[in-house]
Image (spheres, rainbow, N blue to C red):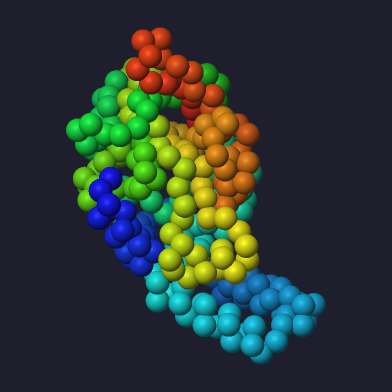
Amino acid sequence: MTENTTEQATAAASGAAATEQFRGKQRAGTAEVGTERVNTLVSELLTAAHDIIRRHQVSYAEYDALKSWLIRVGEDGEWPLFLDVWLEHVVEEVANEQREGSKGTIEGRYYVPGSPALPADASLPMRKGEQGTPLLFQGRVTSVDGTPLTDAKVEVWHADSDGYYSQFAPGLPEWNLRGTVTADETGRFRIRTIEPAPYRIPTDGACGSLISAAGWHAWRPAHLHLKASAPGHRLITTQLYFKGGRHVADDIASAVKPELILDPTPVVDGSGREVRYDFALDKA
């Protein structure tokens, strides 16, 4: 990545891109919420906030600092970042607590639908001379009973070796390191890419100010984002991590699960590393 690209990958620009993507997204189940449900959830949220204020004797100075920070979150376009980093992992946990088969985790804010369609044995779109360790990611998609799922879709997206995502940092091709693979008749797929890097969430905006004030770190471990689907089965959204990777044990987004940590091995010819993961989808 060029120096110019790195300098321009700001919180404001990334936040604006995430907000725009979210506004265009149609998540299943985003119907209007009934009055009774809104009353219940908002009342309990406010009651919890009131309890925190009383227990910790929050001052007017702290209250005004909170108001100022909340305003800045909106101005920086960082509500998607804030919610995806600190809340989504609990929403995902509740949504998938009855799921059988593969484990899910958060989608995060860097998903973009409509990535290029690729065959079962494919390379993700990437720049000529793409930096990073070559990675062969392969596996199979089956139903939870082991039945191969013909023509299952495996959608992949991840950061580059500098920790940047296409469409969220300038200077990267639109679909760099993004693709939707169709598995073969036995549910198998082979995807050639490069190993992503750990990355910090943007720290020059409101969320970065919170991280600094709280004394936290801003890092996510290296990971592959995936969505696997097949007709008659529930789509799974997940992330796969690498054993021994930095921040696997202290991911700021709290999205790592033991079942999602992979252990890559060297390719025989020394041309990189390879890893396998099999998806087991439960029926819709």
Q: Identify the residue shown where x is 22% and y is 51%.
A: 171
Front position in the image: 147 or 210 = 210
Front position in the image: 85 or 30 = 85
Task: Name the quadrant of the N terminus.
Answer: top left
244 to 39, vertically: above or below: above
Quarter assignment of residue 19: bottom left
Front position in the image: 113 or 262 = 262
Residue sitting farthest toward the bottom = 60
Quarter assignment of residue 40: bottom right
Q: Identify the residue shown where x is 23% and y is 31%.
A: 129
Residue sitting farthest toward the front = 3
168 to 248, vertically: above or below: below
**Residue 204 appears anywhere in the view:** yes
**Residue 189 appears anywhere in the view:** no
Q: Is residue 129 left or right of residue 87?
A: left
Question: Horizontal and vertical percent for residue 277?
Answer: 49, 24
Residue sitting farthest toward the right = 55
Q: Identify the residue shown where x is 32% and y is 64%.
A: 13
Q: Is residue 42 left or right of residue 143?
A: right
110 to 195, vertically: above or below: below
Question: Horizontal and vertical percent for residue 192?
Answer: 32, 25
Q: Identify the residue shown where x is 43% and y is 75%.
A: 74
Question: Horizontal and vertical percent for residue 188?
Answer: 39, 19
276 to 44, vertically: above or below: above
Front position in the image: 277 or 3 = 3
Question: Horizontal and vertical percent for residue 248?
Answer: 58, 40
